[in-house]
Amino acid sequence: MAPKEKYIPSETEKAFLSTVTNGKYDREIITGLKKFVDGSVPQDMQGFYSKEELDAIMELDGTDKDLQARMPVKITRHYFEQALKSKAIQTLVKASPKETYDLDGAEDPGKQMSYSPVEGLIHKYELGLIYVASTCSAHCRFCYREELIAKKEITREDGTVAAKGLAKIKDIVDYVLEHNRLVDENSGRHPETNRERLREILMSGGDPMVLGNKNIAQWLGALSEAGIESIRIGTKELAFYPERFDETFFAMLDAFHEAYPQTNLRMMVHFNHPDEFLAKDPDGNYIEHAQGGLEWIPATRASVKEFARRSWINIDNQSPIIAGINDDSDALRIMQRELKRNGVENHYFFCGRDIVGHKAFNVPIEKAWHILNESQKGLSGVEAHARLSITHYKGKTEVAAVTNTLFPGVKGGENGVVIFKLLRSAADAPDRCKVTIVGRNEEAIWFSGYDDRVIMDEAELFSMYDIQPLTAIAAE
């Protein structure tokens, strides 16, 4: 077998990469539960899990309900210190037997592998998502990528079974160039998929910020050379280890911008709760700032302000609404207000996805809508930009409205309706903004909870599974 060709950077890339240095970091990570069990964690970490909690967890070790097989345990020193002051953060990062009581869920949520033309790339929408890392500095128990983080084998489109792999620079560059060449030769649409040019890439994983600056820089340069106009970096590192965003990292970004001034960068950060970035007094209360707003954790605020100084970088937050963590309208209101005040846009809130074990985490869809709606009462228009999204297998879908008004005479609408609006379709952009209306079900945590009460399905969220609206059934 001939050796695989290597990616050869351009002279512009080489000049940029020659300026980049890696920082040195000590995240003081604890991986796994062994050190908690045998008491070898640092003194102040002993007791983070009670003996009863550890006994209950270890009783499942090696069984089909093994918690660490579902999602490895991992935490940084910084995040541990915030967790000591926050029940929400403890729920987010501490393993619990409830995770595996019901392991219902998809091994490949969103059927991503159906949209993976090359290893490590998901080209489901108009942007591409690439897996560049398979871990994070700490692990959220509700992680939507639990199959990647835990290196689980999944069934692929061709019937083979293998774990998801990471993207390689040359493979991604070759794909982008070939895709866009075919689009340009076919009057602006790909001849097979009908997609437009691939202009935007989301670097994800795992968390790209666990990589060194040089590795991140290689991706930034190569994607820009391939014609990508906007690069997103998805990260929770601002919560887990804000010191990662140091002088060497920002120097790398500045050098990148000098080399590729037309490429936009967007940091897609992931704060789930204000306890992840706000300082607290000894009584556990937020601290008012003398000039308005609330005091932030110094390292987190410093990193956010460094991003804000660079007009060519956007910073957006998005978060699922998860039971026991942020299913609290007051917490979400504080979070949205403080983020916007410090230059972070509120992008999306999500309903939980149908990952393996999702029933331990997902908030009912209608409850999530009410929580977000209540949280935005009292916010200004610019503070309340975030919408509630749920990722249907057809595409990203907004939970646009939940009504309390009865619909007499409309079968299925006796208790009000839920209106879903398709925001992005895996099939074709023209389906954008088509809607589906279903009768309410306060217990529904996924679309399947509405299978028996579909009223109108313009967006085909249910008819793609041969589920007919009640109106059509009545007409028959």
Image: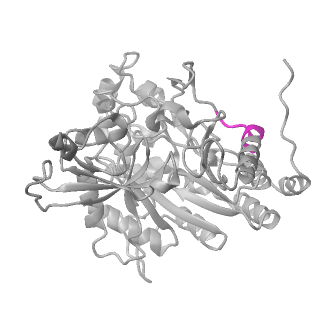
Question: Would you place residue 58 above or below residue 417 in this image?
Answer: above
Q: Answer left or right for 1 relative to 201.
A: right
Residue 446 visible in the shown view? no
Classify the position of the N terminus by image quarter.
top right
User: Residue 408 at x, y = what percent?
Assistant: 8, 57
User: Residue 221 at x, y = what percent?
Assistant: 78, 53
Q: Answer left or right for 255 relative to 102.
A: right
Question: Is 55 in front, or is 265?
Answer: 265
Residue 140 visible in the shown view? yes
User: Residue 164 at x, y = what percent?
Assistant: 58, 29
Question: Is 124 in front, or is 104?
Answer: 124
Question: Would you place residue 337 above or below residue 101 in this image?
Answer: below
Q: Quadrant of residue 162?
A: top right
Residue at image location 66% in from the left, 34% down from the top? 118
Q: Quadrant of residue 319?
A: bottom left
**Residue range corresponding to the magenta coloring:** 166-173
Magenta highlight on residue 190: no
User: Residue 442 at x, y = what percent?
Assistant: 18, 48
Q: How is the image coloured?
A: one colour
Question: Is 332 in front, or is 161?
Answer: 161
How many numbered marks appear?
A: 0
Q: Answer left or right for 466 relative to 225.
A: left
